[in-house]
Amino acid sequence: MLSDGFDAGATPDERLRREVQQRLAFLAEAGEARLPLALDTLAAPDCEWRAAHPMNGMRGSAAAAARIWSPLFAAFPDLERRDAILVAGRYQGKTFIATSGHYCGTMKRDWLGIPATGKTVWLRSGEVWQIGSDGRVVQASLLWDVLDVMRQAGVWPLAPSLGVEGMWPGPLTADGLRLAPSDPMQGRDSLEQTLRMHKSLAEFDDRGSLSREALIAMPQRDHWHPKMMWYGPAGIGTTRSLEGFVDGHQLPFRIAFHRPQGSFDAVMAERARNGAGHYIRIGDGPYSVTGGWPSVYAMHSGAGFCGLPATAKPVFMRVMDFYLHHEGLIRENWVPIDLLNLFLQMGMDVLERMRVQVSGVPRRT
């Protein structure tokens, strides 16, 4: 089965799910004074933290406090956490809890160089928390949409998105917080459907068959709901229906990024050889989650993605996918991507571009 490695029968219990949910909420509202306690309660002392650019990788609570949480609390003193999806599962012997939603707060000070608005800001988040044997986090992967905060602050540094920008809604079915374990076989079926869709994408012949019509007609259509919603990060935006997805993201993306070609197994092997692939593949009732750090390996060989020219550079993409399976098909797909890290590999520092836009003064090199 494509879902080998996912242990459907060993799903985390309700107690662990609720404890992690409570610890995450406590961390979000801890503020500077309670931050050490919140981090100690949530994470192991040597926890590996992986966050979107420019925070990136670090180890231990002190580093996470300094580079992730203290700057966030300084900018948003009334921060709170609002999860729309919380699911759990075991993959390759590791226990995971994955969440998608928003942090909300009043932007009182600049954050990562983004000018304060003095208004409510929604920080979109996709997060995967690997839980150790003592119930604390041993690895945290945080894909926060920094670019969307720029959009809300009125300092947009890119060409207009092809999709629609705005907040991501919660699931259509309003059942995204899976605090009690779901039917394990339903979770396995959900993940299997996602991976069959992935297989159809991996085996599509980009070099010989890439066109709007071919993407719409190829086997991915067997897995997407007619009313599918695809929620991309700021810079790409939201699309509706398979046709909207192809027009608003998939075709421009595949033109720009040339990925390994061949059978599913061959493509996965080439990704792994280059250090890309999935560290999480779980299903939880009508939801499934995959993600890689990085997930995608490709050559940036075509022009047009986010209005940028081709660079001929190899690139790696930090990606998560949260799926809702509804009426036998994939109905919704939330897709956090670390675009700032991707653009940096393409030779564009988005934060510096924003800084020049705000100040009008280029940084001396």
Image (tube, rainbow, N blue to C red):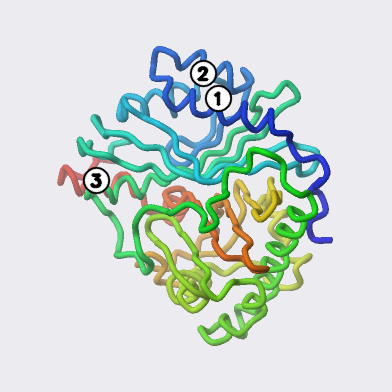
Rendering coords of residue 48 (x, y %): 61, 29
Q: Residue at x 57, y 38 (%)?
A: 141
Assign a secondary structure to mark 1. Answer: helix
Quarter the C terminus occupies: top left
Circles 1 and 2: CB distance less than 8 Å?
A: yes
Quarter the N terminus occupies: bottom right
Rendering coords of residue 23 (x, y %): 55, 24
Circles 3 and 1: CB distance less than 8 Å?
A: no
User: Could you say which quadrant of the image residue 325 lies in?
Assistant: bottom right
How far separated are the C-alphas under marks 3 and 2? Answer: 29 Å
How far separated are the C-alphas under marks 1 and 2? Answer: 7 Å
Question: In the displayed structure, would residue 200 be above or below residue 143?
Answer: below
Image-based side of 346 in relation to 353, left or right: right
Rendering coords of residue 301 (x, y %): 50, 70
How far separated are the C-alphas under marks 3 and 1? Answer: 29 Å
Assign a secondary structure to mark 2. Answer: helix
Which mark is on residue 38?
Answer: 2
**Few, some or many residues within 10 Å of mark 3 (<14, 14–19, 20+):** some
Q: Amino acid at mark 3?
A: Ala
Q: Amino acid at mark 1?
A: Arg
The residue to which callout 1 is attached is 23
The residue to which callout 3 is attached is 153
Question: In the displayed structure, would residue 308 be above or below residue 216?
Answer: above
Q: Residue at x 50, y 22 (%)?
A: 63
